[in-house]
Image (spheres, rainbow, N blue to C red):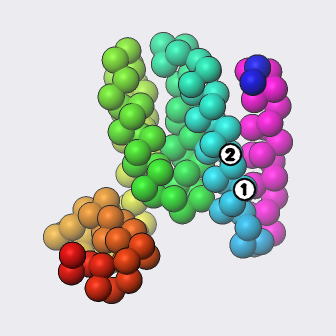
Amino acid sequence: METDTLNTLVTDAIWRAEELETRGIPSASLAWAEVSSIEEDLAKAHPVSGVQGRIARRGAVRAALKAGDYSRAYALADGYLGEENAPESLKTALREIVEEYTQPIAGRFPYASRHHSLREAQGLADRLRAGGAFGLAA
C-alpha cells in the first residue's frame, strides 16, 4: 500500500479513536489497535533515519498502549529499539512513552511494582488468559 494511502488511513483512524475515547465508548481500544497496526505499516515503509519513520514508530507503540495491548507495545518497542540505525533520540522517546503508560499502573500497585516489572505482570496475565489458573503452574 502506498504511504499516502497509509497516511490518510492513520489520520482517519486516529480521529475515530479519539472520538470514541472522548465519548467513553468501550470500542475505543479496538480503534487504537487499528491505529497501531497502520502506524506499524508506516514504520515498515519509512526508514528509521527519517522523520516519518520515527513518528510512525512512536505512534505504533503509543497506540498499542492506548489499546491496552501491552505485549504488542513491548514487542514493537523492543523491535524498534533494536534497529541498527535507530537514533538515540528515538530510543529515549520510546522508553519515555512506555514509562509514561506504566507509571500509573505501578502507582496503583506499589508493592507489586517493587518486586516485579510490568512486563512480568503482563506475561503472567497473558498466561492466565491463555491457560487459566492452572496454566500459571506450568
Mark 1–mark 2 distance (CA, rounded to whole Å): 6 Å
Location of residue 70 with respect to 114 vertically, above or below: above
Q: Looking at the image, which is closer to me, 68 or 37?
A: 37
Residue at the disc numbered 2: 35
The kind of secondary structure element at disc 1 is helix
* Image quadrant in which you'd find residue 80: top left
Residue at the disc numbered 1: 31
Residue 10 on the magenta span: yes
Q: Looking at the image, which is closer to me, 10 or 99?
A: 10
How many numbered callouts?
2
Amino acid type, callout 2: Val
The kind of secondary structure element at disc 2 is helix
| Outermost bottom residue | 133
Quadrant of the frame with the C terminus: bottom left
Location of residue 91 with respect to 111 vertically, above or below: above
Residue 43 on the magenta span: no
Q: Main secondary structure of the magenta part?
A: helix
Task: Indicate the position of residue 52 as horizontal and vertical percent values.
Answer: 61, 20
Could you tell me which residue is drawn at 25 percent across and 69 percent down? 113
Left or right of 13 in this view: 65: left
Task: Indicate the position of residue 60 as horizontal and vertical percent values.
Answer: 57, 40
Circles 1 and 2: CB distance less than 8 Å?
A: yes
Is residue 100 visible to the viewer in this orientation of the structure? no
Could you tell me which residue is drawn at 58 percent across and 57 percent down? 66
Chain part drawn in magenta: 3-23
Q: Which mark is residue 81?
A: none
Could you tell me which residue is drawn at 40 percent across and 60 percent down? 102
Q: Residues within 10 Å of mark 2 (few under 14, many from 20)?
A: many
Amino acid type, callout 1: Ala
Task: Indicate the position of residue 7 as horizontal and vertical percent values.
Answer: 76, 28
Task: Indicate the position of residue 94 as horizontal and vertical percent values.
Answer: 42, 38
Location of residue 30 with respect to 2 vertically, above or below: below
